[in-house]
Amino acid sequence: MQHPSDSPSPFHQTRSDPECGFRVGQRVHWIGDAGRIGTVKYVGPVEGYSGTWVGVDWDNDGDGKHDGSHNSVKYFAARGLKTASFVRPHNLSSGISLLQALEARYRTLSTKEEEDEMYVLSARNKRVSIELLGKDKIQDKLSQFEELTSASLSYLGVSSAGSPNHISSTLPRLKELDLTGNLLAEWEDVGIICKALPSLAALNLSYNSMSCDITTMPQLNNIRILVLNQTGVIWKQVEMLKYSLPCIEELHLLGNKLSKITPVSSTDVQGFDFLRRLNLEDNCIADWEEILKLSQLKSLEQLFLNKNDLNRIWYPDWGTTHESGNGYESLDKNHRPFKTLQCLLLGGNKIEDLDSVDSLNSFPNLVDTRLSENPIADIGKGGVPRFVLIARLAKVEILNGSEVSPRERKDSEIRYVRLVMSKFHNNPEEITRLHPRFAGLKRIHGIEDERPLTGATGPQKMASGLISISLKCVGASMGEKPPVMKKLPATTTIGKLKNLCQSFFKLKSVKPVLFLQEQGSPLPTLLEDDMASLIELGVGNESTILVDEES
Protein backbone atom coordinates (compact mmCIF):
# COMPACT_ATOMS: atom_id res chain seq x y z
CA MET A 1 0.00 0.00 0.00
CA GLN A 2 1.57 3.26 -1.06
CA HIS A 3 1.83 6.48 0.92
CA PRO A 4 0.54 9.70 -0.70
CA SER A 5 4.04 11.14 -0.79
CA ASP A 6 5.17 8.22 -2.96
CA SER A 7 2.36 8.60 -5.47
CA PRO A 8 2.82 10.39 -8.79
CA SER A 9 -0.58 12.11 -8.44
CA PRO A 10 -0.42 15.89 -7.84
CA PHE A 11 -2.86 15.78 -4.88
CA HIS A 12 -0.64 13.68 -2.58
CA GLN A 13 1.80 16.48 -1.69
CA THR A 14 -0.74 18.50 0.26
CA ARG A 15 -0.55 17.75 4.01
CA SER A 16 -2.08 20.98 5.32
CA ASP A 17 -4.36 23.69 4.03
CA PRO A 18 -4.51 26.94 6.05
CA GLU A 19 -7.57 28.09 4.11
CA CYS A 20 -9.72 25.26 5.50
CA GLY A 21 -8.86 26.27 9.08
CA PHE A 22 -7.33 23.00 10.28
CA ARG A 23 -3.76 21.79 10.75
CA VAL A 24 -2.15 18.41 11.36
CA GLY A 25 -1.97 17.62 15.06
CA GLN A 26 -4.95 19.80 15.96
CA ARG A 27 -7.68 18.46 18.28
CA VAL A 28 -11.21 18.67 16.88
CA HIS A 29 -14.72 17.41 17.51
CA TRP A 30 -17.68 16.63 15.30
CA ILE A 31 -20.10 19.51 14.88
CA GLY A 32 -23.11 18.85 17.10
CA ASP A 33 -21.34 16.16 19.15
CA ALA A 34 -18.59 17.57 21.39
CA GLY A 35 -18.00 14.10 22.80
CA ARG A 36 -16.79 12.74 19.45
CA ILE A 37 -13.20 13.94 19.62
CA GLY A 38 -10.18 13.22 17.46
CA THR A 39 -6.84 14.44 16.16
CA VAL A 40 -6.25 15.85 12.69
CA LYS A 41 -3.75 13.64 10.88
CA TYR A 42 -4.13 14.84 7.28
CA VAL A 43 -5.46 17.91 5.43
CA GLY A 44 -5.76 17.91 1.67
CA PRO A 45 -7.38 16.21 -1.33
CA VAL A 46 -8.50 12.59 -1.50
CA GLU A 47 -8.21 10.81 -4.82
CA GLY A 48 -11.55 10.49 -6.59
CA TYR A 49 -13.22 13.30 -4.64
CA SER A 50 -13.21 17.06 -5.11
CA GLY A 51 -12.19 19.68 -2.60
CA THR A 52 -10.29 19.53 0.67
CA TRP A 53 -10.73 16.75 3.21
CA VAL A 54 -9.60 16.45 6.82
CA GLY A 55 -8.28 13.07 7.94
CA VAL A 56 -9.23 12.53 11.60
CA ASP A 57 -8.09 9.77 13.95
CA TRP A 58 -10.91 9.50 16.50
CA ASP A 59 -10.31 8.85 20.20
CA ASN A 60 -13.09 6.26 20.44
CA ASP A 61 -12.51 3.04 18.52
CA GLY A 62 -16.03 2.85 17.08
CA ASP A 63 -16.11 6.35 15.62
CA GLY A 64 -14.06 5.70 12.47
CA LYS A 65 -14.37 3.70 9.26
CA HIS A 66 -10.79 2.85 8.22
CA ASP A 67 -7.09 3.05 9.16
CA GLY A 68 -6.23 6.25 7.27
CA SER A 69 -6.27 4.59 3.83
CA HIS A 70 -8.53 5.01 0.83
CA ASN A 71 -8.41 3.00 -2.41
CA SER A 72 -5.11 1.39 -1.38
CA VAL A 73 -3.46 4.77 -0.69
CA LYS A 74 -2.18 5.36 2.83
CA TYR A 75 -2.81 9.02 3.71
CA PHE A 76 -1.91 8.72 7.39
CA ALA A 77 -1.39 6.12 10.12
CA ALA A 78 -4.35 5.75 12.46
CA ARG A 79 -4.46 4.15 15.91
CA GLY A 80 -6.57 1.22 14.76
CA LEU A 81 -8.16 -0.45 11.79
CA LYS A 82 -11.39 1.54 12.12
CA THR A 83 -10.58 4.70 14.08
CA ALA A 84 -10.13 7.10 11.14
CA SER A 85 -12.39 9.07 8.81
CA PHE A 86 -12.09 11.62 6.04
CA VAL A 87 -14.36 14.53 6.91
CA ARG A 88 -15.38 17.76 5.19
CA PRO A 89 -14.08 20.80 7.13
CA HIS A 90 -17.57 22.20 7.72
CA ASN A 91 -18.43 19.11 9.78
CA LEU A 92 -15.66 19.75 12.32
CA SER A 93 -15.12 22.25 15.13
CA SER A 94 -11.76 23.42 16.43
CA GLY A 95 -13.38 24.39 19.73
CA ILE A 96 -14.32 27.43 21.77
CA SER A 97 -12.83 29.44 24.62
CA LEU A 98 -13.38 28.80 28.33
CA LEU A 99 -15.84 31.64 28.77
CA GLN A 100 -17.80 30.67 25.66
CA ALA A 101 -18.21 27.21 27.17
CA LEU A 102 -19.29 28.80 30.46
CA GLU A 103 -22.01 30.75 28.65
CA ALA A 104 -23.15 27.63 26.81
CA ARG A 105 -23.34 25.54 29.99
CA TYR A 106 -24.94 27.97 32.43
CA ARG A 107 -26.77 30.63 30.45
CA THR A 108 -28.27 28.68 27.57
CA LEU A 109 -31.95 27.99 28.16
CA SER A 110 -33.13 24.45 27.57
CA THR A 111 -34.87 23.94 24.24
CA LYS A 112 -38.46 22.79 23.82
CA GLU A 113 -37.14 19.51 22.45
CA GLU A 114 -35.05 18.97 25.61
CA GLU A 115 -37.98 19.80 27.87
CA ASP A 116 -40.23 17.45 25.89
CA GLU A 117 -37.79 14.64 26.68
CA MET A 118 -38.30 15.18 30.44
CA TYR A 119 -41.18 12.84 31.28
CA VAL A 120 -42.18 9.69 33.14
CA LEU A 121 -44.57 6.97 32.03
CA SER A 122 -47.89 6.63 33.84
CA ALA A 123 -49.50 3.35 34.85
CA ARG A 124 -51.26 3.42 31.48
CA ASN A 125 -47.95 3.96 29.68
CA LYS A 126 -48.68 7.60 28.83
CA ARG A 127 -46.11 10.40 29.02
CA VAL A 128 -46.42 12.73 31.99
CA SER A 129 -44.29 15.87 31.69
CA ILE A 130 -41.92 16.75 34.53
CA GLU A 131 -41.60 20.29 35.82
CA LEU A 132 -38.52 20.96 37.95
CA LEU A 133 -39.48 22.98 41.01
CA GLY A 134 -37.10 25.87 41.58
CA LYS A 135 -35.48 25.39 38.16
CA ASP A 136 -35.53 29.10 37.31
CA LYS A 137 -34.09 30.00 40.70
CA ILE A 138 -31.25 27.51 40.32
CA GLN A 139 -30.61 28.62 36.72
CA ASP A 140 -30.49 32.24 37.82
CA LYS A 141 -27.99 31.44 40.59
CA LEU A 142 -25.76 29.46 38.23
CA SER A 143 -25.81 32.23 35.66
CA GLN A 144 -24.32 34.65 38.20
CA PHE A 145 -20.77 33.75 37.32
CA GLU A 146 -19.16 35.97 39.93
CA GLU A 147 -20.78 33.78 42.63
CA LEU A 148 -19.69 30.44 41.17
CA THR A 149 -17.25 28.40 43.25
CA SER A 150 -17.47 25.24 41.13
CA ALA A 151 -17.98 24.82 37.38
CA SER A 152 -18.29 21.71 35.20
CA LEU A 153 -17.46 22.37 31.54
CA SER A 154 -16.90 18.77 30.48
CA TYR A 155 -17.26 17.80 26.80
CA LEU A 156 -18.02 21.29 25.52
CA GLY A 157 -15.15 21.63 23.05
CA VAL A 158 -12.96 24.00 25.09
CA SER A 159 -9.71 24.46 23.15
CA SER A 160 -8.31 27.76 24.44
CA ALA A 161 -8.26 30.00 27.47
CA GLY A 162 -9.44 33.27 25.99
CA SER A 163 -8.76 36.63 27.63
CA PRO A 164 -7.09 36.18 31.07
CA ASN A 165 -8.46 39.52 32.31
CA HIS A 166 -11.96 38.58 31.25
CA ILE A 167 -11.64 35.19 33.00
CA SER A 168 -10.44 36.85 36.23
CA SER A 169 -13.29 39.39 36.32
CA THR A 170 -15.93 36.82 35.38
CA LEU A 171 -14.99 34.01 37.81
CA PRO A 172 -13.32 35.64 40.83
CA ARG A 173 -14.42 32.96 43.33
CA LEU A 174 -14.02 29.78 41.30
CA LYS A 175 -12.33 27.00 43.34
CA GLU A 176 -13.11 23.86 41.32
CA LEU A 177 -13.05 23.50 37.53
CA ASP A 178 -13.87 20.35 35.56
CA LEU A 179 -12.60 20.45 31.96
CA THR A 180 -12.93 16.71 31.25
CA GLY A 181 -13.12 15.65 27.61
CA ASN A 182 -12.30 18.92 25.87
CA LEU A 183 -9.82 19.91 23.15
CA LEU A 184 -7.10 21.38 25.36
CA ALA A 185 -3.61 20.26 24.40
CA GLU A 186 -1.15 23.01 25.38
CA TRP A 187 0.06 23.43 28.95
CA GLU A 188 0.42 27.13 28.19
CA ASP A 189 -3.38 27.41 27.94
CA VAL A 190 -3.76 25.51 31.21
CA GLY A 191 -1.34 27.93 32.84
CA ILE A 192 -3.24 30.96 31.55
CA ILE A 193 -6.53 29.58 32.94
CA CYS A 194 -5.05 28.80 36.35
CA LYS A 195 -3.21 32.12 36.62
CA ALA A 196 -6.44 33.96 35.82
CA LEU A 197 -8.30 32.08 38.60
CA PRO A 198 -6.44 32.90 41.83
CA SER A 199 -8.91 30.94 43.99
CA LEU A 200 -8.74 27.78 41.86
CA ALA A 201 -7.63 24.78 43.94
CA ALA A 202 -8.93 21.75 41.99
CA LEU A 203 -8.58 21.18 38.22
CA ASN A 204 -9.73 18.16 36.22
CA LEU A 205 -8.16 17.78 32.75
CA SER A 206 -9.08 14.12 32.19
CA TYR A 207 -9.53 12.96 28.58
CA ASN A 208 -7.67 15.94 27.11
CA SER A 209 -4.72 14.85 24.98
CA MET A 210 -1.96 16.94 26.52
CA SER A 211 1.27 18.03 24.80
CA CYS A 212 4.61 16.54 25.83
CA ASP A 213 6.04 20.04 26.30
CA ILE A 214 5.26 21.16 29.83
CA THR A 215 8.00 23.79 30.04
CA THR A 216 5.48 26.59 29.32
CA MET A 217 3.56 25.81 32.52
CA PRO A 218 4.05 28.64 35.07
CA GLN A 219 4.35 28.11 38.81
CA LEU A 220 0.88 27.77 40.32
CA ASN A 221 0.90 27.88 44.11
CA ASN A 222 -2.89 27.72 44.42
CA ILE A 223 -3.51 24.32 42.79
CA ARG A 224 -3.99 21.52 45.35
CA ILE A 225 -5.76 18.85 43.27
CA LEU A 226 -4.92 17.95 39.65
CA VAL A 227 -6.65 15.16 37.73
CA LEU A 228 -4.86 13.98 34.58
CA ASN A 229 -6.65 10.69 33.91
CA GLN A 230 -6.40 9.42 30.32
CA THR A 231 -4.35 12.38 29.13
CA GLY A 232 -1.34 10.48 27.76
CA VAL A 233 1.11 12.02 30.24
CA ILE A 234 4.45 10.30 30.86
CA TRP A 235 6.48 10.37 34.08
CA LYS A 236 8.90 12.93 32.64
CA GLN A 237 6.01 15.39 32.56
CA VAL A 238 4.98 14.43 36.09
CA GLU A 239 8.49 15.27 37.28
CA MET A 240 8.12 18.74 35.76
CA LEU A 241 4.85 19.28 37.60
CA LYS A 242 6.57 19.37 40.99
CA TYR A 243 8.16 22.67 39.96
CA SER A 244 4.96 24.12 38.51
CA LEU A 245 2.72 22.88 41.33
CA PRO A 246 4.77 23.09 44.54
CA CYS A 247 1.70 22.80 46.81
CA ILE A 248 -0.03 19.88 45.05
CA GLU A 249 -1.78 17.52 47.49
CA GLU A 250 -3.65 15.15 45.16
CA LEU A 251 -2.45 13.91 41.76
CA HIS A 252 -4.54 11.49 39.69
CA LEU A 253 -2.86 9.73 36.74
CA LEU A 254 -5.29 6.91 35.98
CA GLY A 255 -5.18 5.18 32.60
CA ASN A 256 -2.03 6.69 31.10
CA LYS A 257 -0.25 3.41 30.22
CA LEU A 258 2.56 4.22 32.66
CA SER A 259 4.95 1.31 33.16
CA LYS A 260 8.06 3.10 34.45
CA ILE A 261 8.64 5.75 37.08
CA THR A 262 11.76 7.64 36.02
CA PRO A 263 13.03 10.20 38.54
CA VAL A 264 15.16 12.91 36.97
CA SER A 265 17.94 13.52 39.49
CA SER A 266 18.08 10.48 41.83
CA THR A 267 16.94 6.90 42.29
CA ASP A 268 13.86 8.00 44.26
CA VAL A 269 11.17 10.53 43.38
CA GLN A 270 11.97 13.74 45.23
CA GLY A 271 9.94 16.87 45.88
CA PHE A 272 6.14 16.84 45.99
CA ASP A 273 6.49 17.79 49.65
CA PHE A 274 2.75 18.13 50.23
CA LEU A 275 1.48 15.26 48.06
CA ARG A 276 -0.93 13.16 50.16
CA ARG A 277 -2.78 11.14 47.51
CA LEU A 278 -1.33 9.63 44.32
CA ASN A 279 -3.61 7.69 41.98
CA LEU A 280 -1.82 5.37 39.54
CA GLU A 281 -4.74 3.03 38.89
CA ASP A 282 -5.32 1.32 35.55
CA ASN A 283 -1.75 1.65 34.29
CA CYS A 284 0.84 -0.95 33.20
CA ILE A 285 3.21 -1.09 36.18
CA ALA A 286 4.46 -4.65 36.61
CA ASP A 287 7.61 -4.28 38.71
CA TRP A 288 7.31 -3.33 42.40
CA GLU A 289 10.74 -1.76 42.15
CA GLU A 290 9.07 1.07 40.22
CA ILE A 291 6.72 1.74 43.14
CA LEU A 292 9.60 1.73 45.63
CA LYS A 293 10.87 4.86 43.89
CA LEU A 294 7.92 6.63 45.56
CA SER A 295 8.87 5.44 49.05
CA GLN A 296 10.52 8.70 50.16
CA LEU A 297 7.58 11.01 49.40
CA LYS A 298 7.41 12.59 52.83
CA SER A 299 3.65 13.30 53.02
CA LEU A 300 2.18 10.42 50.97
CA GLU A 301 -0.83 8.92 52.78
CA GLN A 302 -2.80 7.24 50.00
CA LEU A 303 -1.41 5.29 47.04
CA PHE A 304 -3.87 3.80 44.55
CA LEU A 305 -2.44 0.97 42.42
CA ASN A 306 -5.58 -0.94 41.44
CA LYS A 307 -5.61 -2.53 37.97
CA ASN A 308 -1.89 -2.69 37.24
CA ASP A 309 0.24 -5.79 36.52
CA LEU A 310 1.99 -6.25 39.88
CA ASN A 311 2.57 -9.90 40.83
CA ARG A 312 4.63 -9.41 43.98
CA ILE A 313 5.22 -6.73 46.58
CA TRP A 314 7.64 -6.37 49.49
CA TYR A 315 8.80 -3.83 52.03
CA PRO A 316 12.38 -2.65 51.46
CA ASP A 317 15.07 -3.45 54.01
CA TRP A 318 15.50 0.07 55.34
CA GLY A 319 17.57 -0.89 58.40
CA THR A 320 20.70 -1.72 56.43
CA THR A 321 23.62 0.66 56.13
CA HIS A 322 24.28 2.69 53.02
CA GLU A 323 27.41 4.33 51.68
CA SER A 324 27.90 8.03 52.33
CA GLY A 325 30.69 10.57 52.05
CA ASN A 326 31.94 9.62 55.53
CA GLY A 327 31.80 5.87 55.05
CA TYR A 328 28.73 3.82 56.00
CA GLU A 329 25.81 4.93 58.13
CA SER A 330 22.37 3.60 59.02
CA LEU A 331 19.21 5.02 57.55
CA ASP A 332 17.43 7.00 60.27
CA LYS A 333 13.72 6.93 60.98
CA ASN A 334 13.16 10.02 58.82
CA HIS A 335 14.11 7.95 55.76
CA ARG A 336 11.92 4.98 56.59
CA PRO A 337 10.14 3.95 53.35
CA PHE A 338 6.47 4.88 53.08
CA LYS A 339 6.57 6.23 56.62
CA THR A 340 3.29 8.19 56.27
CA LEU A 341 1.37 5.76 54.03
CA GLN A 342 -2.02 4.79 55.49
CA CYS A 343 -3.89 3.47 52.45
CA LEU A 344 -2.50 1.14 49.73
CA LEU A 345 -4.96 -0.14 47.14
CA LEU A 346 -3.74 -3.18 45.18
CA GLY A 347 -6.97 -4.61 43.76
CA GLY A 348 -7.05 -6.12 40.28
CA ASN A 349 -3.36 -7.02 40.08
CA LYS A 350 -1.69 -10.44 39.79
CA ILE A 351 -0.52 -11.00 43.38
CA GLU A 352 -0.66 -14.66 44.31
CA ASP A 353 1.74 -15.20 47.24
CA LEU A 354 1.17 -14.83 50.99
CA ASP A 355 4.62 -13.30 51.46
CA SER A 356 3.30 -10.22 49.65
CA VAL A 357 0.35 -10.11 52.03
CA ASP A 358 2.59 -10.48 55.08
CA SER A 359 4.88 -7.68 53.87
CA LEU A 360 2.05 -5.20 54.38
CA ASN A 361 2.62 -5.56 58.15
CA SER A 362 5.98 -3.81 57.71
CA PHE A 363 4.43 -0.55 56.46
CA PRO A 364 4.53 1.49 59.68
CA ASN A 365 1.14 3.24 59.43
CA LEU A 366 -0.86 1.16 56.92
CA VAL A 367 -4.47 0.59 58.04
CA ASP A 368 -6.42 0.42 54.74
CA THR A 369 -5.69 -1.94 51.85
CA ARG A 370 -7.43 -3.62 48.94
CA LEU A 371 -6.47 -7.08 47.66
CA SER A 372 -9.67 -8.10 45.87
CA GLU A 373 -9.43 -9.35 42.27
CA ASN A 374 -5.97 -10.80 42.89
CA PRO A 375 -5.34 -14.56 42.70
CA ILE A 376 -4.36 -14.56 46.40
CA ALA A 377 -7.86 -13.35 47.36
CA ASP A 378 -9.73 -15.65 44.96
CA ILE A 379 -10.50 -19.03 46.51
CA GLY A 380 -11.32 -20.42 43.06
CA LYS A 381 -7.73 -19.65 41.96
CA GLY A 382 -6.02 -21.11 45.00
CA GLY A 383 -6.33 -17.97 47.10
CA VAL A 384 -7.42 -17.56 50.70
CA PRO A 385 -10.69 -16.30 52.24
CA ARG A 386 -11.19 -12.91 53.88
CA PHE A 387 -10.71 -14.21 57.44
CA VAL A 388 -7.19 -15.47 56.60
CA LEU A 389 -6.22 -12.08 55.15
CA ILE A 390 -7.52 -10.30 58.24
CA ALA A 391 -5.63 -12.64 60.56
CA ARG A 392 -2.36 -12.20 58.68
CA LEU A 393 -2.70 -8.40 58.49
CA ALA A 394 -2.20 -7.23 62.07
CA LYS A 395 -2.98 -3.52 61.72
CA VAL A 396 -5.47 -3.33 58.87
CA GLU A 397 -8.76 -1.65 59.82
CA ILE A 398 -10.32 -1.54 56.34
CA LEU A 399 -9.98 -4.47 53.91
CA ASN A 400 -11.37 -4.35 50.38
CA GLY A 401 -13.44 -1.29 51.27
CA SER A 402 -15.12 -2.92 54.31
CA GLU A 403 -14.36 -2.05 57.90
CA VAL A 404 -12.78 -4.79 60.00
CA SER A 405 -14.66 -4.61 63.29
CA PRO A 406 -13.04 -5.78 66.55
CA ARG A 407 -15.41 -8.76 66.61
CA GLU A 408 -14.60 -9.74 63.01
CA ARG A 409 -10.88 -9.50 63.75
CA LYS A 410 -11.17 -11.67 66.85
CA ASP A 411 -13.31 -14.28 65.07
CA SER A 412 -11.00 -14.28 62.04
CA GLU A 413 -7.86 -14.72 64.10
CA ILE A 414 -9.34 -17.59 66.13
CA ARG A 415 -10.57 -19.33 62.97
CA TYR A 416 -7.18 -18.85 61.38
CA VAL A 417 -5.31 -20.35 64.35
CA ARG A 418 -7.59 -23.40 64.41
CA LEU A 419 -7.19 -23.80 60.63
CA VAL A 420 -3.39 -23.79 60.92
CA MET A 421 -3.51 -26.22 63.86
CA SER A 422 -5.67 -28.64 61.87
CA LYS A 423 -3.25 -28.59 58.94
CA PHE A 424 0.16 -28.51 60.62
CA HIS A 425 -0.38 -30.00 64.07
CA ASN A 426 2.69 -32.23 63.77
CA ASN A 427 5.02 -29.76 62.08
CA PRO A 428 5.83 -26.69 64.25
CA GLU A 429 8.79 -25.68 62.06
CA GLU A 430 6.54 -25.46 59.02
CA ILE A 431 4.03 -23.37 60.98
CA THR A 432 6.73 -20.89 62.02
CA ARG A 433 7.95 -20.57 58.43
CA LEU A 434 4.58 -20.23 56.70
CA HIS A 435 2.51 -18.51 59.38
CA PRO A 436 4.53 -15.77 61.10
CA ARG A 437 1.61 -14.50 63.20
CA PHE A 438 0.42 -17.93 64.38
CA ALA A 439 2.30 -18.17 67.69
CA GLY A 440 1.41 -14.62 68.70
CA LEU A 441 -2.29 -15.05 67.85
CA LYS A 442 -2.44 -18.36 69.68
CA ARG A 443 -1.05 -16.68 72.77
CA ILE A 444 -3.31 -13.58 72.49
CA HIS A 445 -6.48 -15.65 72.28
CA GLY A 446 -5.38 -18.31 74.81
CA ILE A 447 -5.84 -21.20 72.41
CA GLU A 448 -4.40 -24.45 73.67
CA ASP A 449 -3.22 -27.36 71.58
CA GLU A 450 -6.09 -29.81 71.26
CA ARG A 451 -5.31 -33.16 72.84
CA PRO A 452 -7.97 -35.86 73.32
CA LEU A 453 -8.63 -36.74 76.96
CA THR A 454 -7.44 -40.17 78.10
CA GLY A 455 -10.26 -42.58 77.81
CA ALA A 456 -12.43 -40.19 75.91
CA THR A 457 -15.21 -41.80 73.99
CA GLY A 458 -15.82 -41.46 70.30
CA PRO A 459 -18.78 -39.06 70.65
CA GLN A 460 -16.77 -36.80 73.00
CA LYS A 461 -13.96 -36.55 70.45
CA MET A 462 -16.50 -35.84 67.75
CA ALA A 463 -18.22 -33.07 69.73
CA SER A 464 -14.95 -31.19 70.24
CA GLY A 465 -14.69 -30.70 66.45
CA LEU A 466 -18.30 -29.69 65.75
CA ILE A 467 -19.22 -26.31 64.30
CA SER A 468 -22.66 -24.73 64.13
CA ILE A 469 -23.69 -23.45 60.70
CA SER A 470 -26.83 -21.89 59.26
CA LEU A 471 -28.04 -23.20 55.89
CA LYS A 472 -30.30 -20.92 53.80
CA CYS A 473 -32.03 -21.87 50.54
CA VAL A 474 -31.83 -19.13 47.89
CA GLY A 475 -32.45 -21.13 44.69
CA ALA A 476 -35.35 -19.91 42.54
CA SER A 477 -36.97 -23.33 42.16
CA MET A 478 -36.42 -24.45 45.76
CA GLY A 479 -39.41 -22.59 47.15
CA GLU A 480 -39.56 -20.81 50.48
CA LYS A 481 -37.83 -22.93 53.09
CA PRO A 482 -36.85 -21.79 56.59
CA PRO A 483 -33.12 -21.70 57.42
CA VAL A 484 -31.71 -24.80 59.07
CA MET A 485 -29.15 -24.73 61.92
CA LYS A 486 -26.89 -27.78 62.00
CA LYS A 487 -23.85 -28.89 63.99
CA LEU A 488 -21.39 -30.64 61.71
CA PRO A 489 -17.81 -31.88 62.01
CA ALA A 490 -15.34 -29.22 60.84
CA THR A 491 -13.83 -31.93 58.62
CA THR A 492 -17.05 -32.28 56.58
CA THR A 493 -16.24 -31.88 52.90
CA ILE A 494 -18.19 -29.61 50.55
CA GLY A 495 -19.25 -32.65 48.53
CA LYS A 496 -20.66 -34.29 51.67
CA LEU A 497 -22.44 -31.07 52.69
CA LYS A 498 -24.11 -30.84 49.28
CA ASN A 499 -25.53 -34.33 49.78
CA LEU A 500 -26.70 -33.40 53.27
CA CYS A 501 -28.43 -30.28 51.91
CA GLN A 502 -30.40 -32.40 49.48
CA SER A 503 -31.59 -34.41 52.46
CA PHE A 504 -32.19 -31.47 54.84
CA PHE A 505 -34.29 -29.52 52.31
CA LYS A 506 -35.74 -32.52 50.41
CA LEU A 507 -34.32 -31.32 47.12
CA LYS A 508 -35.21 -33.64 44.27
CA SER A 509 -33.43 -33.42 40.91
CA VAL A 510 -31.64 -30.25 42.06
CA LYS A 511 -27.86 -30.06 42.19
CA PRO A 512 -26.93 -27.67 45.04
CA VAL A 513 -24.28 -24.98 44.74
CA LEU A 514 -22.93 -23.60 48.03
CA PHE A 515 -21.74 -20.11 48.94
CA LEU A 516 -20.15 -18.84 52.16
CA GLN A 517 -21.65 -15.53 53.30
CA GLU A 518 -19.01 -13.66 55.28
CA GLN A 519 -19.24 -10.49 57.32
CA GLY A 520 -17.58 -7.59 55.52
CA SER A 521 -17.61 -9.25 52.08
CA PRO A 522 -19.93 -7.61 49.52
CA LEU A 523 -20.49 -10.91 47.70
CA PRO A 524 -20.67 -14.50 49.00
CA THR A 525 -17.78 -16.85 48.23
CA LEU A 526 -18.40 -19.85 46.00
CA LEU A 527 -17.47 -23.17 47.65
CA GLU A 528 -16.66 -25.24 44.58
CA ASP A 529 -13.98 -27.71 45.72
CA ASP A 530 -15.96 -30.81 46.72
CA MET A 531 -12.88 -32.38 48.34
CA ALA A 532 -12.11 -29.39 50.62
CA SER A 533 -13.30 -29.49 54.23
CA LEU A 534 -15.25 -26.75 56.00
CA ILE A 535 -12.32 -25.83 58.21
CA GLU A 536 -9.95 -25.63 55.23
CA LEU A 537 -12.26 -23.12 53.56
CA GLY A 538 -12.61 -21.03 56.70
CA VAL A 539 -16.17 -22.03 57.57
CA GLY A 540 -16.24 -21.36 61.29
CA ASN A 541 -18.77 -21.51 64.09
CA GLU A 542 -22.05 -19.67 63.36
CA SER A 543 -21.19 -19.25 59.67
CA THR A 544 -23.95 -18.87 57.09
CA ILE A 545 -23.96 -21.00 53.94
CA LEU A 546 -26.28 -20.15 51.07
CA VAL A 547 -27.73 -23.09 49.13
CA ASP A 548 -28.36 -22.22 45.49
CA GLU A 549 -29.04 -24.41 42.48
CA GLU A 550 -26.84 -25.21 39.50
CA SER A 551 -27.94 -23.20 36.48
Image (tube, rainbow, N blue to C red):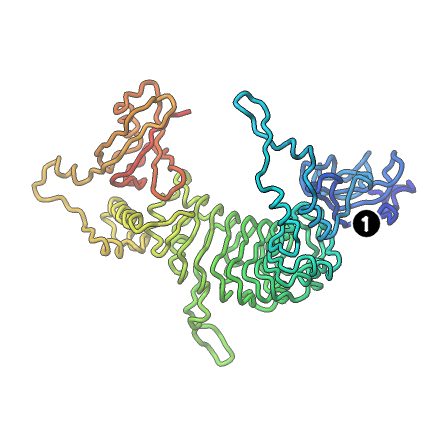
x and y, in percent, of residue 85 in the image = 76, 38
x then y, percent, for residue 71: 82, 34
- Residue 374 falls left or right of residue 261: left
Q: Residues within 10 Å of mark 1 (few under 14, many from 20)?
A: some
Name the quarter where the N terminus is drawn: top right
105 vs 279, left or right, is: right
Q: Residue furthest bottom?
A: 326
In the rendered image, the quadrant that contains the C terminus is: top left
Which image quadrant for residue 73? top right
Task: Answer whether residue 1 is visible to the viewer in this image.
Answer: no
Which residue: 29% across, 55% down? 432
Q: Residue furthest top?
A: 509
Return the residue found at the far right.
10
Residue 172 makes an appearance in the image: yes
Question: 22 or 358, which lies in front?
Answer: 22
Q: Secondary structure at mark 1?
A: loop
Residue projecting furthest to the left? 455
Question: Where is residue 235, by image quadrant?
Answer: bottom right
Residue type indicated by callout 1 = Arg
**541 relative to 230 in the view: left or right:** left
Residue 483 picture location, percent across and down: 28, 29
Q: Which residue is mark 1?
A: 23
The spot of residue 381 in percent (x, y) is: 42, 40
Determine whether 288 is above or below 265 in the image.
above
| Up/down of 515 relative to 272, above or below | above
